[in-house]
Image (cartoon, coloured by chain):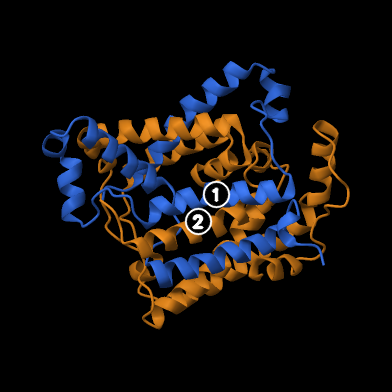
Amino acid sequence: MINPLTMKSWSPYGVGIGVGVLSWFAFAVADQPLGISTAFEHTAALMEKAAVPQVEQTNEYFATKAEAGKSPKIGLGWMLVLGVFVGAWLSSWLSGDRSSEAVPAMWRERFGGSVPLRLAAATSTALAIYGRKEQSHV
Amino acid sequence: MFDSPERLLLGLLIGIVFGVLLQKGQVAKFSVIVGQFVLKDWTVVKIMGTAVVVGSVGVYALVALGHADLHVKPLLLGGVLLGGVCFGVGMVVLGYCPGTGVAACGEGKPDAMVGVLGMLAGALAFVAAWPALQPVIKGLGDMGKITLPSVTGTSPWLWIAGLWIAGLTTLLIVARRGNPPSSRTAQSRAASAPVSPNKSQGSGPFRPVAAIRH
């Protein structure tokens, strides 16, 4: 039998079932949903606190989060993000499905092959992705 | 500042499994994410649809048995509308969402790496501007931690049954219309580096499930 980890891809339905079952596990054992963006927020908050310690008093973010028992920390969710990186690295390494291509083919067809343009667009719009955090206040 | 070492390890393990699933699901790729938004590649709908129907029934069963708590976020219309639009623009131009972006970094993609730095910059701006953003976020009201069952006073299982019917119908339609994964592999094979032919796709929908359990 072929080692499934050396396969380039699995059925999307199988992957969906896997993610669904993993979410049961995350709720039951870790008491939290599978989430990524909170770890970015916590990293940012810890960086700002390290750079400017007074920010903990001047920015009410810190007091509000502390009151809700959700102070920024290097926690389970933070390690989960690190794990996603490690897992994807491991999976792509075992299957040889790796790529260092900065400009995806679909992007090149429409906007050309400029690497700086692609990287600038990727960086600046990723900033906007973070706007989603506005959906929750605590 | 830190969780206990056991929780940190648990987080890492859950993350590794999640990362493997995202990578094997082919969603750590610009062409697959953007391909979904231009309705040419239905991988994202297949994965998310299956994950939602499988996840919902298990999570609500765990809650009913007292083994888990739901983590309901408050419904803040202003924040949802503004944040949703920002997220949509970001996701389509970058070509990854936060989770698939981190997975794409693991695959070695430079655009995802600068994207993750961009997300961190966004997070820095969000935390710094947090007090100023509150009026915008709550501008259209805070409806509290509501769910469809709680608002309508009905059983969550009624909604889960509806979700299963809607989800399975969508997946059936998509399975009939969507591109099979093999055609995408053929395209990328033509476009980029040669791919060794013996690393084939999973044949049926159930074989990879066995793969995940190994």
Residue shown at the point (56%, 34%) measured from the top left: B112
Question: Looking at the image, is mark 2 or mark 1 nearer the viewer?
Answer: 1
**Residue B77: percent from left, percent from top:** 33, 46
Chain under numbered label 2: B
Is B15 located above or below residue B140 in the figure?
below
Q: Residue B176 carries which label?
A: none
Q: Are marks 2 and 1 in contact (CB under 8 Å)?
A: yes
Any part of residue B213 in sight:
yes
**Residue B48: percent from left, percent from top:** 59, 56
Residue shown at the point (46%, 58%) measured from the top left: A34
Colour chain A is painted in: blue
Q: Is mark 2 on a helix, strand or loop?
A: helix
- Decide if residue A99 is on the left or right side of residue A21: right
- Decide which of B156, B184 is in the foreground and name it: B184
Q: Which mark is residue B15?
A: 2
Q: Which mark is residue A86?
A: 1
Compute the Cα span from label 2 to label 1. 8 Å
Amino acid carrying label 1: it is Val
Report the number of numbered marks. Answer: 2
